[in-house]
Structures are given as C-alpha cells and as structure tokens.
Image (cartoon, helix red, strand yellow):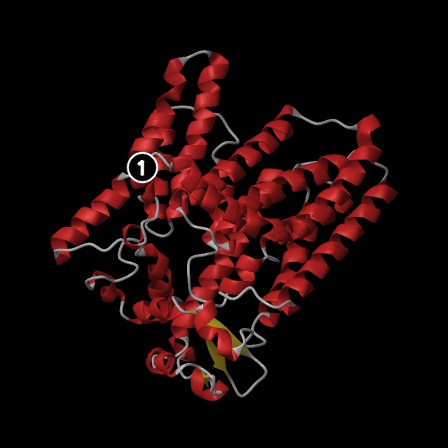
Amino acid sequence: MRKPSRLIVCALFVLLVPGFLAALLVGPRAPGDKQQTFCVHNMVTDTPFGLSLNCDSLGHLSTAYRPGAIFDKGHPRQSRPLMVMSGALLRPLFTFADDAPKWLGLRPADDMPDNYKGWVDSVMDFGMSGFIAFAVFNLALLCVCYWLYLLLVGSASVSAASALLVGSVGLLLVGNDVVKAFFWSPHGQLYNMLVPLIGLWTMVSPARGWRRGALIGLASGVGVLAYPLFLIVPVCFALRAAFDAVAARRVSLAAPAVAAMAAVFLAPVAWYVFVLNYTGSFYSDSLAFNQGFWIVDSARRGTFWADLAVPAHALWYFLQPQLVALCAMVALALTLFVLAVPRLNVSRADAGLCIAAFAVSAVALAFYALAGLNTARSAAAALPPLIVVCGVLARVSAEAVRPWAAWAIALAGFATIYVQLVYTVVKAGPYS
C-alpha cells in the first residue's frame, strides 16, 4: 500500500480496537445462575469492570505460574503445551501488576457456585501478571491477523477511499464472537482467526521445492502443539502444490505437498516421545474426547456419512449468525462492483486468491466436522478467508469507480464495522 493508505488502515486499528477491547471488560456478562451451563466463572471488581472467565482459563493461568505442571499426569494441555507457554514466557514482564487484584477489588462474584470459588481464589492469589501476559499475547495475535489480511488483500495502488473500505472489512477479524468471548479469557481460541489466514498465505505463491514444503510442514507441526487447527496449513499448501503439478503436467511438482504432509508430524511425535519417556504417560484431550478418532468406529459400522452430517450441520448452524456483518460488507462491495463493471480490471492473482480463500474456508469446516466439534468458535474458522474475499472485492471495485462512489461506500463500510463493534460488545453472549 502507499503510505497514506497504510496510515489509514493503521489508524482504523489503533482508534477502534483498544476501545472495543476495553468495553469487553465491562461485566461480567454471563447471568450468575448460568455460570455452570456456560462454563464460565464470573469475576467482579469495585469498578464497573468484570469478567466471565472461561472454565479452562483458570488452568491456563495456573500453568503460567507453574509451567512444569504440564508434565503432571493427565494435565489437560499436555498435548498442546504451547497453548499455555505463551503466558508462562510473558508473565515475568508483568510481575509489577501482581498486586492489582487488591487495588481493583477483584474477586469471585457472590453468585459463583461454591465448587468454583476455591479454585478461583487460589489462582487469583498468584496475582495479575499471568492474566495480562495472555491478554498481551492475544493482542499480538490480532495484530498479526490484521497484518496478514492487509498483506493478502493490499495493493501498491490502493486509494485512500479503498484503504478505508478495505481496512473496515478487515476489522471483522476483531469484531466477532470469538474475540468477544476469549480475548480476556486466557485460552487458544483466537488461533481460529489466525490459522486460516496462514493457510491462505501458503497458497498465494507457487509451492516451489520440497524444502519449502518441509519447512511449512515443520512449522505447522510446532503450531499443532499450540492448536490442532494448524494441521490445515500443510493441507492448504498441498492443495496449491497439487494445482501446480496438474497445471504444469509434472508429477514432480507434487513433492512439496508430500514433504509438508510428512514434516507436520515431526514435532508432535517428538513431543509425545519426550513426554512419554520423561513422565511415563501422555494425556491427549483429543483422544479423551474422541475427536477425530470417532471416524474409525463410524467407518467400521458403515455409518460414516450419517455420523459426519451431525457435526457438519451443527457447524453450519453456528456459522450463519456470524455471517451477518460480513454479508453487509459484501453487499457494499458488490454495489461498488456493479458500478465499476465498465472499468473493472480483475487480475488473475486476485481471482486466484479468492478461489483459494473459499478452499481454505471449506478445509477449516471439514477439519472441525471430522474432529466432531460443533461449537460457534469452531465455525468461526471459516470466516477469515471469506473476509479476505470481501476485502479483495472491495479493493478491486473501489479502484475502478468514481471517487465519490468509492468514498460513499467506504464511509458506509466504516459505519458498518463501527456498528458491528458496538453490537458485539452490548449483545447478550456469546459466553466463553
């Protein structure tokens, strides 16, 4: 992007995101009698601010103070150690805030179930540094998501109006249910925003040699130790390699795909062997909840497709309400597209990026359907690539219309994302 355009998209993020994230702290949001139902712990302060912490967040916080707990038998994050290590690594930077709970009067809500209070009290005795560490890491993830989106969508000739519209579309990566529920709850769910963008990035350029495939697979395998969705990255890369091989009619061009798919298992297997030898046991929450492993039993019974329909339908059910704001942005971009038809110039690169984005969304949904998950946060993994498609459509169209039309739609796009941010804050739920 040109410098003025870069300033516009950066200003959008800096001006809107901090206020949105701060507003999410007004609470707690979950009704007191629904804490067990929604798997949250309500925390209150002597101020208007409060939290509805996810029930898994307390385990993340305690591990941030005692990283060695990851080797305890049956630790729920033993197969995903990097999900909690971000807090452990960053926490020493914020020990100055460990007395903050006393200043703020942070405490469990009076209506918290008794079986929750002891655990929450023990975690809060550690202080605030772990909580801040996870929040800072989540902010870094959001910044990387926005940067990757702009990298994928951006162009050297973007006008100011186009930059405003493209930047507004990109903020859908922030103004969504996953960020609302999990930004302030230490967890790994924000990877649902980041990983699909990484998968799409691997498909932008030709696969090239097997070394690049091996590197992408190895890096993705390390990512799996933080969040299993990283498994889709080598799959996306393999799709690009397969396309290159078919287009060039050269089977040898599929070598990067093989390298990526093989290398992705190196880090998880190495970690498994290390933990098994170090502790004598290994706990996998995926195995405990039969995630993905249900396929074997289902195939034996001959009911695979019928069984797959259940999580697939659930994912579609949870995805639909999350598409409303995106559809509004798409409608604005399509309006520009219609106005721009006489002067439109869609490059092959833009068209290819959009096709790849749809493929990544499908892969993300297929991954969660095969895992057997059916939550709203899982369905959200399909959104980031679709947001990129909308951004490309907006940029291409805004560059080809009269300036007055581009500015009118850009301002409408800004108003849309502003309303979406406010609506996300004030609406009931989702509860982490």
Relative depth, front residue between 62 and 306: 306
Rendering coords of residue 52 (x, y %): 49, 73
Please tell me whether residue 415 is drawn above or below residue 428 in the rendered image: above
Q: Is residue 339 left or right of residue 427?
A: right
**Residue assigned mark 1:** 301
- Is disc 1 surrounded by few (<14), some (14 to 19) or many (20+) residues within 10 Å? few
Quadrant of the rendered structure where residue 221 is?
Answer: top left
Rendering coords of residue 313 (x, y %): 52, 45
Residue 409 visible at all: yes
Please tell me which residue is depicted at 57% across the width and 85% down the height of the picture.
47
Q: Is residue 314 left or right of residue 127?
A: right
Relative depth, front residue between 185 and 263: 185
Which secondary structure lies at badge 1? helix
Rendering coords of residue 82 (x, y %): 33, 55
User: Which quarter of the figure is the N terminus placed in?
Assistant: top right
Please tell me which residue is depicted at 59% across the width and 76% down the height of the picture.
26
Please tell me whether residue 345 is drawn above or below residue 90 in the rendered image: above
Quadrant of the rendered structure where residue 355 is?
Answer: top right
Q: How many marks?
A: 1
Residue 264 visible at all: no
Q: Label 1 amino acid?
A: Arg
